[in-house]
Amino acid sequence: MTVAAIHLHRDDLPAAVRFADTVAIDTETMGLKPERDRLCLLQLSAGDGVCHLVQFSNPAGSPEETARAAPNLRALLNDPAVTKLFHFGRFDIAMLSRALGVTCRPVYCTKIASRLARTYTDRHGLKDLCRELLGIELAKEQQSSDWGAEALSEDQQRYAAGDVLYLHALKAKLDAMLAREGRVDLARACFEFLPHRALLDLAGWPDEDIFAH
């Protein structure tokens, strides 16, 4: 897929931007602890080669203040008619819940789909999926860069876009594999539980298996 455009916005998605029934979403944060680290950037794509980046410029603001500043984005994330498509959605859903006060439903996670469909491997990262299923090599040099910077570099923007531009194509491939292996219903049940798993993380059970004996 050729990247058609990357659009950078501040604090909210423009009202004129619309997505169909599925939007690919990813987040960039100051760290990997949703209860501690702030949301810096949100990436969105309809799978058409266009990526919209929403950069949050108020690091000192409370979640309530951030939520009030992003009404268009919150409306999209709360829309039950739009499937929110993630890779490792558990983290992103928790971060969006804490930072913007939204509950993302319905959701689809390509990492969960991969674990259910690609049981012949233990490599379920986005880079691995893009390489095997789409023949695309993703650059990951900017993965640990400073996403809280006032101005994002072009390399950072391209990296961030790469995390959402191919999720629709991956979903199509993984859906076919899930159907072939008879695991569509199991995957759907996992996706439905995912927002609850994210809430468990935020409530203090990030590592403990509460279903264990």
Image: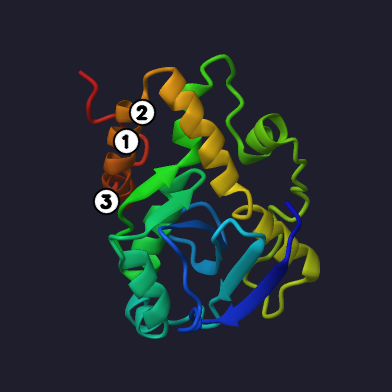
Residue 134, position as x, y percentages in the image? 69, 37
Residue 179 in the image: above or below residue 91: above
Q: Is residue 101 left or right of residue 45?
A: left
Residue type at the position of mark 1: Arg
Q: Nearer the viewer, mark 2 or mark 3?
A: 2
Q: Is residue 147 left or right of residue 68?
A: right
The answer to which of 14 and 182 lies nearer the viewer is: 182
Q: In this figure, which residue is indicated by the disc labeled 3?
A: 203
Q: In this figure, which residue is indicated by the disc labeled 1?
A: 188
Q: Is residue 96 left or right of residue 140?
A: left
**Residue 116 makes an appearance in the image:** no
The quarter of the picture where residue 30 lies is bottom right
Circle 2 crowding by C-alpha within 10 Å: few under 14, some 14–19, many from 20 = some
The residue located at (34%, 62%) in the rendering is 97
The residue located at (67%, 38%) in the rendering is 130
Residue 53, position as x, y percentages in the image? 60, 71
Q: Real-space Cα distance between discs 1 and 2?
A: 6 Å
Return the disc, 2 or 3, that comes first in the chain's sequence.
Answer: 2
Q: Secondary structure at mark 2?
A: helix
